[in-house]
Image: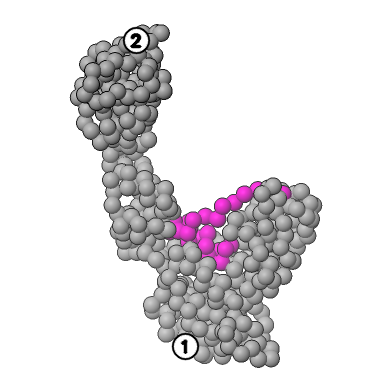
Amino acid sequence: MHRTDTRSVSVEAHRESVRGLLAPLRTPDRIELLPLLAALGRGLAADVVAPVDLPPFANSQMDGFAIRSADVADGGTELRVVAPIPAGAAPERLLPGTAAPIMTGAMMPPGADAVVPIEQAVPDYFPVPGEPATVTLPAAPAGNFIRGAGSDIRAGEPALAAGTFLGPGQLGLLAALGLTEAAVYRTLRVLLVTTGDEVVEPGRPLGPGKIYDSNATLLESSMLQAGLGVTRSGISTDRPEELAAVLRRHAPGVDLIVTTGGVSKGAYEVVRQALDGQDVEFVGVAMQPGGPQGIGTFDGVPVLGFPGNPVSCLVSFEMFLRPVLGELFGSPARRPAVRARLAEALTSPRGKHQVRRGTFQPDGTVRLEGGAGSHLVSALARSNALIHVPEGTADLPRGAEVEVWML
Protein backbone atom coordinates (compact mmCIF):
# COMPACT_ATOMS: atom_id res chain seq x y z
CA MET A 1 0.00 0.00 0.00
CA HIS A 2 1.43 3.39 -0.91
CA ARG A 3 1.58 6.02 1.79
CA THR A 4 0.51 9.65 1.65
CA ASP A 5 2.40 11.97 3.96
CA THR A 6 0.40 15.05 4.84
CA ARG A 7 3.50 16.79 6.15
CA SER A 8 5.44 19.28 4.07
CA VAL A 9 9.08 18.21 3.94
CA SER A 10 12.00 20.48 3.14
CA VAL A 11 13.96 20.40 -0.10
CA GLU A 12 17.01 19.15 1.80
CA ALA A 13 15.03 16.37 3.51
CA HIS A 14 13.58 15.11 0.24
CA ARG A 15 16.96 15.26 -1.48
CA GLU A 16 18.32 13.12 1.35
CA SER A 17 15.49 10.65 0.78
CA VAL A 18 16.39 10.45 -2.91
CA ARG A 19 20.03 9.89 -1.94
CA GLY A 20 19.00 7.06 0.37
CA LEU A 21 16.87 5.52 -2.38
CA LEU A 22 19.67 5.48 -4.95
CA ALA A 23 22.69 4.80 -2.70
CA PRO A 24 22.22 0.99 -2.90
CA LEU A 25 22.95 1.24 -6.64
CA ARG A 26 26.55 2.19 -5.87
CA THR A 27 27.90 -1.35 -5.71
CA PRO A 28 31.24 -2.86 -6.81
CA ASP A 29 29.59 -4.85 -9.61
CA ARG A 30 28.59 -1.56 -11.25
CA ILE A 31 32.22 -0.52 -11.75
CA GLU A 32 33.87 -0.99 -15.14
CA LEU A 33 37.27 -0.16 -16.65
CA LEU A 34 37.05 2.03 -19.74
CA PRO A 35 39.62 3.57 -22.09
CA LEU A 36 40.16 7.20 -21.16
CA LEU A 37 38.14 8.76 -23.98
CA ALA A 38 35.25 6.36 -23.37
CA ALA A 39 35.25 7.50 -19.73
CA LEU A 40 34.56 11.14 -20.67
CA GLY A 41 31.61 12.42 -18.64
CA ARG A 42 31.62 9.50 -16.21
CA GLY A 43 32.37 9.53 -12.49
CA LEU A 44 35.59 8.03 -11.17
CA ALA A 45 34.79 4.97 -9.05
CA ALA A 46 38.12 4.57 -7.24
CA ASP A 47 40.91 6.82 -5.98
CA VAL A 48 43.85 7.24 -8.35
CA VAL A 49 47.36 7.48 -6.91
CA ALA A 50 50.11 8.92 -9.12
CA PRO A 51 52.29 6.02 -10.36
CA VAL A 52 55.09 8.37 -11.48
CA ASP A 53 56.40 11.85 -10.79
CA LEU A 54 54.90 14.57 -12.95
CA PRO A 55 56.94 15.85 -14.63
CA PRO A 56 59.06 12.67 -14.50
CA PHE A 57 62.34 14.61 -14.82
CA ALA A 58 63.62 18.15 -14.32
CA ASN A 59 63.07 20.11 -17.54
CA SER A 60 63.48 23.56 -18.97
CA GLN A 61 60.64 26.02 -18.67
CA MET A 62 62.04 28.20 -21.47
CA ASP A 63 64.02 28.10 -24.69
CA GLY A 64 67.45 29.17 -23.54
CA PHE A 65 70.80 27.94 -22.23
CA ALA A 66 71.29 25.34 -19.51
CA ILE A 67 74.14 26.39 -17.21
CA ARG A 68 75.86 25.67 -13.94
CA SER A 69 74.85 28.74 -11.90
CA ALA A 70 78.25 28.78 -10.16
CA ASP A 71 79.96 29.35 -13.55
CA VAL A 72 78.34 32.76 -14.15
CA ALA A 73 79.47 35.77 -12.16
CA ASP A 74 77.49 38.92 -11.50
CA GLY A 75 77.72 41.10 -14.57
CA GLY A 76 77.80 38.10 -16.92
CA THR A 77 80.25 35.47 -18.09
CA GLU A 78 81.24 34.16 -21.50
CA LEU A 79 80.74 30.40 -21.83
CA ARG A 80 81.53 27.87 -24.54
CA VAL A 81 78.43 26.54 -26.33
CA VAL A 82 78.08 22.75 -26.49
CA ALA A 83 75.64 20.45 -28.28
CA PRO A 84 72.00 21.51 -28.09
CA ILE A 85 69.39 19.57 -26.09
CA PRO A 86 66.10 19.02 -27.93
CA ALA A 87 62.94 17.82 -26.19
CA GLY A 88 62.96 14.05 -25.83
CA ALA A 89 66.76 13.66 -25.70
CA ALA A 90 68.80 12.23 -22.82
CA PRO A 91 71.64 14.81 -22.47
CA GLU A 92 75.20 14.26 -21.32
CA ARG A 93 76.62 15.92 -18.21
CA LEU A 94 77.24 19.65 -18.56
CA LEU A 95 80.91 20.42 -17.98
CA PRO A 96 82.14 23.50 -16.09
CA GLY A 97 82.46 26.63 -18.24
CA THR A 98 79.93 25.50 -20.85
CA ALA A 99 76.33 26.29 -21.78
CA ALA A 100 73.94 24.00 -23.64
CA PRO A 101 71.15 25.35 -25.87
CA ILE A 102 67.98 23.79 -24.49
CA MET A 103 64.39 23.72 -25.71
CA THR A 104 61.24 24.15 -23.62
CA GLY A 105 60.37 20.81 -21.97
CA ALA A 106 63.77 19.25 -22.66
CA MET A 107 65.50 17.29 -19.90
CA MET A 108 68.04 19.24 -17.86
CA PRO A 109 71.54 17.81 -18.28
CA PRO A 110 73.28 16.43 -15.18
CA GLY A 111 75.40 19.15 -13.60
CA ALA A 112 73.19 22.03 -14.80
CA ASP A 113 71.00 23.80 -12.26
CA ALA A 114 69.63 26.87 -14.07
CA VAL A 115 68.31 28.07 -17.43
CA VAL A 116 68.93 31.53 -18.92
CA PRO A 117 66.25 32.51 -21.49
CA ILE A 118 67.51 33.06 -25.04
CA GLU A 119 66.31 36.69 -24.88
CA GLN A 120 68.92 37.45 -22.18
CA ALA A 121 71.84 35.93 -24.13
CA VAL A 122 74.45 37.81 -26.17
CA PRO A 123 74.02 37.06 -28.98
CA ASP A 124 70.30 36.36 -28.46
CA TYR A 125 70.04 33.45 -30.85
CA PHE A 126 71.20 29.86 -30.95
CA PRO A 127 74.43 29.21 -32.88
CA VAL A 128 74.55 26.73 -35.75
CA PRO A 129 74.99 23.24 -34.24
CA GLY A 130 78.48 21.85 -34.65
CA GLU A 131 80.17 25.20 -35.21
CA PRO A 132 82.40 26.60 -32.41
CA ALA A 133 80.64 29.37 -30.55
CA THR A 134 80.51 31.24 -27.27
CA VAL A 135 77.69 33.07 -25.53
CA THR A 136 77.67 35.70 -22.79
CA LEU A 137 75.01 35.09 -20.15
CA PRO A 138 73.90 36.99 -17.05
CA ALA A 139 74.00 35.40 -13.61
CA ALA A 140 71.02 33.18 -12.72
CA PRO A 141 70.14 31.56 -9.39
CA ALA A 142 69.97 27.79 -9.04
CA GLY A 143 66.54 26.56 -10.16
CA ASN A 144 65.99 29.46 -12.56
CA PHE A 145 63.31 28.50 -15.14
CA ILE A 146 63.44 24.81 -14.25
CA ARG A 147 60.42 22.60 -13.68
CA GLY A 148 61.56 20.14 -11.02
CA ALA A 149 60.74 16.44 -11.16
CA GLY A 150 57.46 15.91 -9.30
CA SER A 151 56.79 19.65 -9.08
CA ASP A 152 53.24 19.02 -10.33
CA ILE A 153 52.58 15.76 -8.47
CA ARG A 154 54.86 13.15 -6.92
CA ALA A 155 54.61 9.38 -7.28
CA GLY A 156 52.44 7.98 -4.49
CA GLU A 157 50.46 11.19 -3.99
CA PRO A 158 46.67 11.28 -4.54
CA ALA A 159 45.92 12.30 -8.13
CA LEU A 160 42.11 12.10 -8.32
CA ALA A 161 39.57 11.08 -5.69
CA ALA A 162 36.73 8.64 -6.22
CA GLY A 163 33.63 10.56 -7.26
CA THR A 164 35.53 12.99 -9.47
CA PHE A 165 33.72 13.97 -12.67
CA LEU A 166 35.95 13.05 -15.60
CA GLY A 167 36.20 15.99 -17.96
CA PRO A 168 39.03 16.77 -20.39
CA GLY A 169 41.30 18.11 -17.64
CA GLN A 170 40.95 15.03 -15.48
CA LEU A 171 41.45 12.65 -18.40
CA GLY A 172 44.49 14.68 -19.47
CA LEU A 173 46.02 14.20 -16.02
CA LEU A 174 45.46 10.44 -16.16
CA ALA A 175 47.10 10.32 -19.59
CA ALA A 176 50.04 12.41 -18.35
CA LEU A 177 50.53 9.82 -15.59
CA GLY A 178 50.76 7.09 -18.22
CA LEU A 179 47.35 5.57 -17.48
CA THR A 180 45.17 4.24 -20.30
CA GLU A 181 42.00 3.28 -18.43
CA ALA A 182 39.77 4.61 -15.69
CA ALA A 183 37.49 2.78 -13.25
CA VAL A 184 34.04 4.35 -13.61
CA TYR A 185 30.46 3.60 -12.65
CA ARG A 186 28.29 2.00 -15.29
CA THR A 187 25.64 4.15 -16.92
CA LEU A 188 22.37 4.06 -14.98
CA ARG A 189 19.39 2.88 -17.02
CA VAL A 190 16.21 4.92 -16.50
CA LEU A 191 12.65 4.19 -17.59
CA LEU A 192 10.89 7.49 -18.33
CA VAL A 193 7.08 7.40 -18.31
CA THR A 194 4.83 10.32 -19.20
CA THR A 195 1.20 9.98 -18.09
CA GLY A 196 -2.08 11.63 -18.99
CA ASP A 197 -5.03 11.12 -21.33
CA GLU A 198 -4.72 14.77 -22.27
CA VAL A 199 -1.15 14.41 -23.53
CA VAL A 200 -0.38 13.90 -27.23
CA GLU A 201 2.91 13.09 -28.93
CA PRO A 202 4.29 16.07 -30.90
CA GLY A 203 3.50 15.79 -34.59
CA ARG A 204 0.07 14.23 -34.13
CA PRO A 205 -3.28 16.05 -34.48
CA LEU A 206 -4.18 18.08 -31.39
CA GLY A 207 -7.80 17.50 -30.42
CA PRO A 208 -9.97 19.52 -28.02
CA GLY A 209 -8.61 19.53 -24.46
CA LYS A 210 -5.32 17.98 -25.56
CA ILE A 211 -1.75 19.27 -25.14
CA TYR A 212 1.52 18.23 -26.69
CA ASP A 213 3.89 16.26 -24.48
CA SER A 214 6.95 18.37 -23.62
CA ASN A 215 7.84 16.55 -20.40
CA ALA A 216 9.34 13.51 -22.09
CA THR A 217 11.61 15.64 -24.29
CA LEU A 218 12.54 17.93 -21.41
CA LEU A 219 13.45 15.09 -19.11
CA GLU A 220 15.00 12.72 -21.65
CA SER A 221 17.31 15.44 -22.98
CA SER A 222 18.22 16.40 -19.39
CA MET A 223 18.94 12.79 -18.52
CA LEU A 224 20.99 12.16 -21.65
CA GLN A 225 22.95 15.33 -20.94
CA ALA A 226 23.55 13.97 -17.44
CA GLY A 227 24.97 10.72 -18.82
CA LEU A 228 22.00 8.44 -18.18
CA GLY A 229 20.68 5.73 -20.45
CA VAL A 230 16.98 6.38 -21.11
CA THR A 231 14.12 4.14 -22.18
CA ARG A 232 10.91 5.95 -23.04
CA SER A 233 7.74 3.93 -22.72
CA GLY A 234 5.59 6.36 -24.66
CA ILE A 235 2.65 8.19 -23.15
CA SER A 236 0.69 6.12 -20.66
CA THR A 237 -3.05 6.60 -20.38
CA ASP A 238 -4.87 7.46 -17.18
CA ARG A 239 -5.82 3.81 -16.67
CA PRO A 240 -3.84 2.59 -13.63
CA GLU A 241 -3.79 -1.04 -14.74
CA GLU A 242 -2.17 -0.09 -18.06
CA LEU A 243 0.48 2.01 -16.35
CA ALA A 244 1.22 -0.77 -13.86
CA ALA A 245 1.61 -3.20 -16.77
CA VAL A 246 4.07 -0.85 -18.49
CA LEU A 247 6.13 -0.50 -15.33
CA ARG A 248 6.11 -4.23 -14.67
CA ARG A 249 7.22 -5.00 -18.24
CA HIS A 250 10.20 -2.62 -18.15
CA ALA A 251 11.23 -2.79 -14.47
CA PRO A 252 13.55 -5.83 -14.74
CA GLY A 253 15.73 -4.06 -17.32
CA VAL A 254 16.25 -0.69 -15.62
CA ASP A 255 17.88 0.76 -12.51
CA LEU A 256 15.39 3.58 -11.93
CA ILE A 257 11.85 4.52 -12.93
CA VAL A 258 10.86 8.18 -13.33
CA THR A 259 7.25 9.15 -13.97
CA THR A 260 5.72 12.54 -14.67
CA GLY A 261 2.23 13.52 -13.67
CA GLY A 262 -0.34 11.75 -11.56
CA VAL A 263 1.20 12.40 -8.13
CA SER A 264 -1.02 15.18 -6.76
CA LYS A 265 -3.96 14.71 -4.41
CA GLY A 266 -6.70 14.77 -7.06
CA ALA A 267 -9.24 12.04 -7.67
CA TYR A 268 -7.67 10.73 -10.89
CA GLU A 269 -3.96 10.59 -10.13
CA VAL A 270 -2.91 7.59 -12.18
CA VAL A 271 0.60 7.15 -10.76
CA ARG A 272 -0.76 7.02 -7.23
CA GLN A 273 -3.32 4.43 -8.29
CA ALA A 274 -0.90 2.33 -10.35
CA LEU A 275 1.57 2.19 -7.46
CA ASP A 276 -1.03 1.07 -4.95
CA GLY A 277 0.41 -1.91 -3.08
CA GLN A 278 3.99 -0.84 -3.74
CA ASP A 279 6.46 0.62 -1.24
CA VAL A 280 5.94 4.22 -2.41
CA GLU A 281 5.32 7.39 -0.45
CA PHE A 282 3.75 10.57 -1.79
CA VAL A 283 4.85 13.76 -0.06
CA GLY A 284 4.54 17.49 -0.39
CA VAL A 285 7.91 19.23 -0.64
CA ALA A 286 8.10 22.85 0.52
CA MET A 287 9.13 23.97 -2.97
CA GLN A 288 7.59 26.01 -5.76
CA PRO A 289 7.24 24.69 -8.42
CA GLY A 290 7.44 20.93 -7.94
CA GLY A 291 5.82 20.39 -4.54
CA PRO A 292 4.10 17.01 -5.08
CA GLN A 293 6.66 14.18 -5.21
CA GLY A 294 6.55 10.39 -5.16
CA ILE A 295 9.41 8.21 -3.95
CA GLY A 296 9.86 4.51 -3.25
CA THR A 297 10.18 1.24 -5.16
CA PHE A 298 8.14 -0.65 -7.73
CA ASP A 299 8.81 -4.39 -7.67
CA GLY A 300 12.07 -3.51 -5.91
CA VAL A 301 13.17 -0.93 -8.52
CA PRO A 302 13.66 2.66 -7.29
CA VAL A 303 10.92 4.99 -8.54
CA LEU A 304 10.60 8.77 -8.48
CA GLY A 305 7.31 10.43 -9.31
CA PHE A 306 7.65 14.00 -10.60
CA PRO A 307 4.75 16.44 -11.08
CA GLY A 308 3.15 16.77 -14.51
CA ASN A 309 3.68 20.45 -15.30
CA PRO A 310 6.74 20.90 -17.54
CA VAL A 311 8.69 23.35 -15.41
CA SER A 312 7.83 21.39 -12.27
CA CYS A 313 9.23 18.15 -13.64
CA LEU A 314 12.43 19.82 -14.86
CA VAL A 315 12.95 21.64 -11.55
CA SER A 316 12.37 18.33 -9.75
CA PHE A 317 15.10 16.71 -11.84
CA GLU A 318 17.51 19.60 -11.20
CA MET A 319 16.80 19.82 -7.48
CA PHE A 320 16.72 16.14 -6.59
CA LEU A 321 17.86 13.59 -9.16
CA ARG A 322 20.72 15.41 -10.89
CA PRO A 323 22.62 16.54 -7.75
CA VAL A 324 22.18 13.16 -6.04
CA LEU A 325 23.56 11.32 -9.08
CA GLY A 326 26.57 13.63 -9.04
CA GLU A 327 27.18 13.04 -5.33
CA LEU A 328 26.84 9.27 -5.51
CA PHE A 329 28.42 8.48 -8.87
CA GLY A 330 30.53 11.53 -9.74
CA SER A 331 28.41 12.24 -12.81
CA PRO A 332 26.90 14.54 -13.89
CA ALA A 333 29.05 17.46 -12.85
CA ARG A 334 27.61 19.84 -10.29
CA ARG A 335 25.77 22.85 -11.71
CA PRO A 336 28.00 25.93 -11.35
CA ALA A 337 26.59 28.05 -8.51
CA VAL A 338 27.21 31.80 -8.51
CA ARG A 339 25.97 34.78 -6.56
CA ALA A 340 24.04 37.37 -8.52
CA ARG A 341 22.06 40.54 -7.89
CA LEU A 342 18.39 40.61 -8.82
CA ALA A 343 17.60 42.91 -11.75
CA GLU A 344 14.10 43.32 -10.33
CA ALA A 345 12.19 42.68 -7.12
CA LEU A 346 10.39 39.39 -6.52
CA THR A 347 7.98 37.83 -4.05
CA SER A 348 7.99 34.24 -2.82
CA PRO A 349 5.80 32.07 -0.57
CA ARG A 350 7.46 32.34 2.82
CA GLY A 351 7.00 28.67 3.62
CA LYS A 352 8.53 27.35 0.39
CA HIS A 353 11.86 27.24 -1.42
CA GLN A 354 11.05 29.01 -4.67
CA VAL A 355 12.97 28.23 -7.86
CA ARG A 356 12.59 30.90 -10.55
CA ARG A 357 13.92 30.89 -14.08
CA GLY A 358 16.21 33.69 -15.13
CA THR A 359 18.97 35.00 -17.36
CA PHE A 360 22.36 35.63 -15.79
CA GLN A 361 23.81 38.73 -17.43
CA PRO A 362 27.39 39.92 -18.03
CA ASP A 363 27.08 42.67 -15.41
CA GLY A 364 26.50 40.11 -12.63
CA THR A 365 22.74 40.61 -12.39
CA VAL A 366 20.05 38.03 -13.05
CA ARG A 367 16.83 38.90 -14.85
CA LEU A 368 13.62 36.99 -14.13
CA GLU A 369 12.09 35.15 -17.06
CA GLY A 370 8.33 34.77 -16.81
CA GLY A 371 6.40 34.34 -13.60
CA ALA A 372 6.39 31.63 -10.97
CA GLY A 373 3.93 29.42 -12.90
CA SER A 374 4.94 25.83 -13.57
CA HIS A 375 3.54 25.84 -17.13
CA LEU A 376 5.74 28.62 -18.57
CA VAL A 377 7.87 26.60 -20.99
CA SER A 378 8.75 29.59 -23.18
CA ALA A 379 10.22 31.39 -20.15
CA LEU A 380 12.24 28.28 -19.38
CA ALA A 381 13.55 28.22 -22.95
CA ARG A 382 14.79 31.82 -22.58
CA SER A 383 16.58 31.08 -19.32
CA ASN A 384 20.18 30.14 -18.61
CA ALA A 385 19.89 29.93 -14.82
CA LEU A 386 17.76 28.81 -11.89
CA ILE A 387 17.29 31.42 -9.15
CA HIS A 388 16.96 30.12 -5.59
CA VAL A 389 14.81 31.91 -3.04
CA PRO A 390 15.19 30.08 0.30
CA GLU A 391 12.29 28.97 2.45
CA GLY A 392 11.38 31.74 4.88
CA THR A 393 11.93 34.59 2.41
CA ALA A 394 8.81 36.42 1.21
CA ASP A 395 10.21 39.48 -0.57
CA LEU A 396 13.52 40.39 -2.16
CA PRO A 397 14.17 43.90 -3.51
CA ARG A 398 15.94 44.77 -6.72
CA GLY A 399 19.68 44.40 -6.17
CA ALA A 400 19.34 41.67 -3.51
CA GLU A 401 21.93 38.91 -3.76
CA VAL A 402 20.70 35.40 -4.58
CA GLU A 403 22.21 32.01 -5.38
CA VAL A 404 21.98 31.10 -9.04
CA TRP A 405 22.60 27.70 -10.68
CA MET A 406 23.87 28.01 -14.23
CA LEU A 407 22.09 25.77 -16.74
Between residue 108 and residue 161, name the one nearer to us: 108
Q: Which residue: 58% across, 59% down? A: 407
Between residue 179 and residue 258, name the one nearer to us: 179
In the rendered structure, which segment of residues is drawn in magenta? Answer: 317-341
State the mark number for residue 77: 2
Q: Which residue: 38% across, 21% down? A: 124
x, y percent for residue 128: 27, 25
Q: Relative to 260, is 141 above or below?
A: above
Q: Which residue: 50% across, 76% down? A: 192
Q: Quarter-wise, where is residue 105 in the image?
A: top left
CA gap, disc 2 and disc 1 = 88 Å
Q: Which residue: 27% across, 22% down? A: 100
x, y percent for residue 16: 54, 60
State the mark number for residue 245: 1
Q: Is residue 29 magenta?
A: no
x, y percent for residue 109: 25, 25
Q: Is there CB contact under 8 Å for labels 2 and 1?
A: no
